[in-house]
Amino acid sequence: MRPPTLCLAHAGGAHHSLPLTIAGDMMRALYLSFLLITAFACQPADTSASAKSAIDAANAQWPRLTGTGHADSIAEFYAADAVIMPPNVGTMKGKEAIRTFFATMNTMDPKPILTLHADAVHGAGAMAMERGRWHWAFPAGAKLPPGMPAVDSGKYIVHWMQQSGKWVMVDDIWNSDTPLPSAPPPPPAPARRGR
């Protein structure tokens, strides 16, 4: 039995027949080439360097802004519909809720100084992810609220988007490296009375 053939016609009227297996292999190779070219052509540009530069500039402002209580300026780092997820508090959404959160934090007196350090920034097109470390400390000799550590540090992840040419935070989550207080030991078992 002969394999099926593919008939190719040219404008001049000539006809050629190719075995379908060869034509099928050629079509698969062309299709695969098309898919690879399309996939690589559609990749967003690597914006890691420009995103890291903008993020580092924003992070450099946090110590001054937290130390002087500028909640409005801090809120400007966030998108209008941004979400923050602080530890031990419910999720907050929107720039106004974020401004209120930082305004409340800024009522502490004396104010702690917060520093941020981006360990890694990965950008693709108008989106970037930042992974980093934070540290906050009250001034030496500050009278602290009961149970408040004078120094704390931890890690964070921030999802950034470039909107109107400016990098802004869209999602921000952080947590502390300080261990949770341990639970008190269970009470001793009641003494058994002898008979």
Image: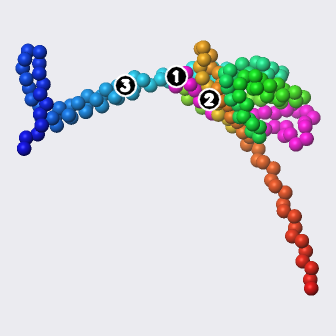
Tell me where residue 178 appears, x and y as whole percent.
76, 44
Type of amino acid at the residue the image marks with label 3:
Thr
Q: In terms of secondary structure, where does tag 3 sit?
A: helix
Nearer the N terminus, badge 2 or badge 1?
A: 1
Type of amino acid at the residue the image marks with label 2:
His
Which residue occupies the foreground of this view, 61 or 75? 75
Nearer the N terminus, badge 1 or badge 3?
A: 3
Residue bearing mark 3: 38
Q: CB of mark 2 within 8 Å of CB of mark 3?
A: no
Residue 111 occupies quadrant: top right
Residue bearing mark 1: 125
Cα–Cα gap, marks 2 and 1: 13 Å
Type of amino acid at the residue the image marks with label 1:
Gly
In percent of the image, x 12 and y 37: which residue is there? 4
Range shown magenta: 124-153
Residue bearing mark 2: 159
